[in-house]
Amino acid sequence: MKKITHEDFKVVAPIELSKIPTTFDLKESENKIEKELEEVREKLGKLQDTMYAHDKYAVLICLQGMDTSGKDSLIREVFKDFNTRGIIVHSFKVPTELENSHDYLWRHYIALPQKGKFGVFNRTHYENVLVTRVHPEYIMGENIPHINSVEDIDDAFWDTRFEQIRNFEKHIAQNGTLIYKFYLHLSKKEQKNRLLRRLEKKEKNWKFSAGDLKERKLWDRYQECYQDAINRTSVPHAPWYVIPADDKPVARYIVAKTIYDSLKEYKDIQEPELDEETKANLELYKQQLEKE
């Protein structure tokens, strides 16, 4: 199978999404790719146990992508071998009345993973510069001072919001959160195929919404906004990875391998050692238990 590294899909310079392929050939069968994924996710699960004991870093996985890009199934398959106490998934929907009574980042702050755990944001704080940028009228629900109409939402507004997001990520990174942001790069053709499957297969009908077709008509605008967001916010402490997503098994493997290989570079992530007194008396403790 073709070897990949965690650097291969990282955004380190300005990109043009239209020039990045939505497919990637691992030069292996689907069964073999799924087998490789099983091995990587098992290693990830063991590493998470070590990180839980180490209790120094938290890991935040951010997943973004167009509708049908495969976020839900990727979460299911990549993190299947995790201890449930070590991972929390948050799927951010339309802000509630309570959430809109706070600033837009509040609901993301309170959902951050604690040290030793993984947090997965299924759709993220970037929705605040993506869907709201495509539909600026949504901003009005936030009741922001000095924003009295859609006309007030100008370039300076978005510049400020990007700065706030960069500061948010810088703050949590400086305090021990390792951030990995994945954009699942889906082609418009493959999205059409996946939407058709939702309509054709009765058991998948529930996933379909007429709103999906309305948003599909805005495909080019979404691509512009995604590209701008990625280029403005991919930094060493919070990098973006553009993952070819037309083939789900390939996308899942790339994401899992990227996370695992990157985390393995943190050589200080080790299970804590017992104190000298406990180590010196292990045999004694064993004898005490055996005599019970």
Image: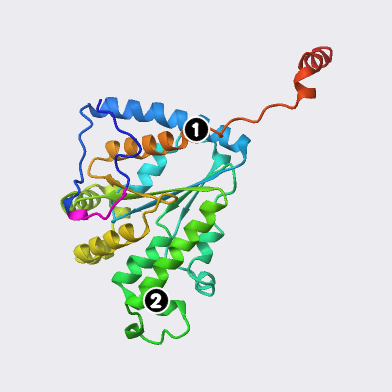
Q: Does the magenta stretch include residue 204?
A: no
Q: Residue 32 location in percent, x, y?
A: 28, 25
Range covered by the magenta-colored residues:
11-18
- Residue identifier under label 2: 139
Query: Is residue 192 visible to us here?
Result: yes
Q: Is residue 16 magenta?
A: yes
Q: Is residue 57 above or below residue 132?
A: above
Q: Residue at x 27, y 59 (%)?
A: 227
Query: Is residue 112 visible to us here?
Result: no
| Dominant secondary structure of the residues highlighted in magenta in the image | loop
Q: Earlier in the sequence, mark 2 or mark 1?
A: 1
Label 2, label 1: how far apart the Cα atoms are: 39 Å
Q: Residue 269 location in percent, x, y?
A: 56, 34
Left or right of 194: which side holds 41? Answer: right
- Amino acid type of disc 1? Gly
- Amino acid type of disc 2? Ile
Left or right of 217: which side holds 98? Answer: right
Label placed on residue 250: none
Q: Is residue 263 above or below residue 39?
A: below
Q: Residue 188 location in percent, x, y?
A: 18, 54
Q: What element carries label 1?
A: helix
Residue 129, quarter of the rendered image: bottom left
Q: Residue at x 20, y 42 (%)?
A: 23
Foreground residue among 280 and 130 = 280
Q: Quadrant of the N terminus?
A: top left
Foreground residue among 232 and 290 = 232
- Residue identifier under label 1: 45
